[in-house]
Image (tube, helix red, strand yellow):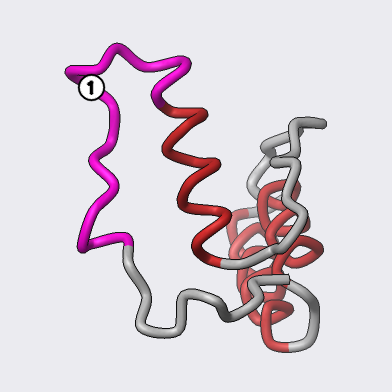
Amino acid sequence: MSATETKRAIHEAITAFAQQDLTTAGLHLFRTLGYRTEVRLPMQQRTVDEFTELFARAANSWMPSAHAPTVGPAWTCSSSSRPIN
């Protein structure tokens, strides 16, 4: 694939976020970028709060505490119960 074709594919994957749910569009973007994984977060409520908690818990399990991301005000959302699909 040429550089122009790659850029076009990335652009199309990004614009798909407007029409697709976040999970589908995100997985498609990652595939377009060459990232392949079967790992999925086991989300039940699919809210920003749930994602933030699961992300922080997962990061703490595979990163030394000195390098783990800090989940605080920068991670909050005024409509945190908004579904993220």
Counting from the top left corner in percent of width and height, residue 39 is at 75, 31
As rendered, which of 24 and 61 lies closer to the eye? 61
Q: Is residue 61 left or right of residue 44?
A: left
Q: Is residue 17 left or right of residue 62?
A: right
Counting from the top left corner in percent of width and height, residue 12 is at 70, 75
Magenta segment main secondary structure: loop
Counting from the top left corner in percent of width and height, residue 80 is at 47, 75
Q: Where is 38 relative to 66, above or below?
A: below
Name the residue rendered at 25%, 17% in the picture: 65
Q: Where is 27 relative to 14, above or below?
A: above
Amino acid type for the residue under numbered disc 1: His
Name the residue rendered at 55%, 41% in the picture: 54
SS for dot 1: loop
Q: Does the segment drawn in magenta span residue 71?
A: yes
The residue that disc 1 covers is 67
Q: Write down the region rendered in magenta.
A: 60-75
Q: Where is 57 relative to 17, above or below?
A: above
Counting from the top left corner in percent of width and height, residue 73 is at 21, 62
Q: Does the segment drawn in magenta span residue 62?
A: yes
Q: The C terminus appears in which quarter of the rendering?
A: bottom right
Name the residue rendered at 46%, 17% in the picture: 61
The quarter of the displayed image where residue 59 is located: top left
As rendered, which of 9 and 75 lies closer to the eye? 75
Image label count: 1
The quarter of the displayed image where residue 36 is located: top right
The quarter of the displayed image where residue 8 is located: bottom right
Other-residue count near label 1 (Cα within 10 Å), few / some / many at <14 / 14–19 / ≥20: few
Q: Is residue 6 left or right of residue 51?
A: right
Q: Where is 44 relative to 67, above or below?
A: below
